[in-house]
Amino acid sequence: MQYTKQQIIDKANAACKNTLMETLDIEFIDYGKDFVVAKMPVSPKVYQPDGVLHGGATAALAETVGSFASHIFLDLENTFVRGIEITANHIKSVKSGNVYAKATFIHKGRTTQLFDIKITDDEQRLISVCKLTTIALPKTK
């Protein structure tokens, strides 16, 4: 069965129910041939004690969008995806609005995938730069 772009986005968002992604209000909003985009509102729910976006919430957003990119482009009937390494460089603080994560493939292998993930704010200012490595492992039956 061939799914439309919106059906895939809707399915991804539905899969976030009762997960960290729901807790952080992460929502998938777009994807293409080699990228996936998700957004997360910046509110006290994701603050560090001094009232700005917590780096851990940013890293969770980055891992979410990269892992979903692997899910879209791999055979999930026979494999499952796990993040195995993430790095994050935080450049600018954010106190309100939304942040957007765009994961772009650097390497799209059958076993490992490497992503460049840019986190931006509502004005498209760069907030963080992340790298994520995921691995596709065989499902045991």
Image (cartoon, rainbow, N blue to C red):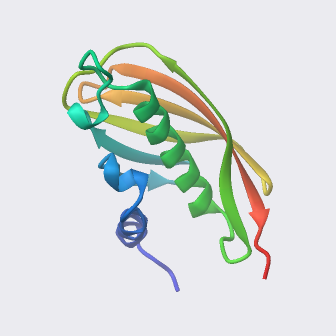
The x and y percentages for residue 53 are 32, 25
In the rendered view of the protein, which quadrant contains the C terminus? bottom right
The x and y percentages for residue 87 are 61, 27
Residue 95 placement, left or right of 48: left
Residue 104 picture quarter: top right
Judge whether residue 8 can be spotted in this image: yes
Number of marks in picture? 0
Residue 99 picture quarter: top left
Vertical placement of residue 108 versus 53, above or below: below
Measuring 59% from the left and 61% from the top, which residue is drawn there? 71
Question: Which residue is most to the bottom?
Answer: 1
Residue 16 picture quarter: bottom left
The x and y percentages for residue 49 are 29, 20
Measuring 43% from the left and 25% from the top, which residue is drawn there? 55
Vertical placement of residue 20 versus 126, above or below: below
Residue 103 placement, left or right of 6: right
| Closest to the observer, 66 or 139 | 139
Measuring 40% from the left and 71% from the top, which residue is drawn there? 11
Judge whether residue 108 can be spotted in this image: no
The x and y percentages for residue 132 are 63, 37
| Closest to the observer, 33 or 128 | 128
Measuring 53% from the left and 55% from the top, which residue is drawn there? 68
Residue 48 placement, left or right of 31: left
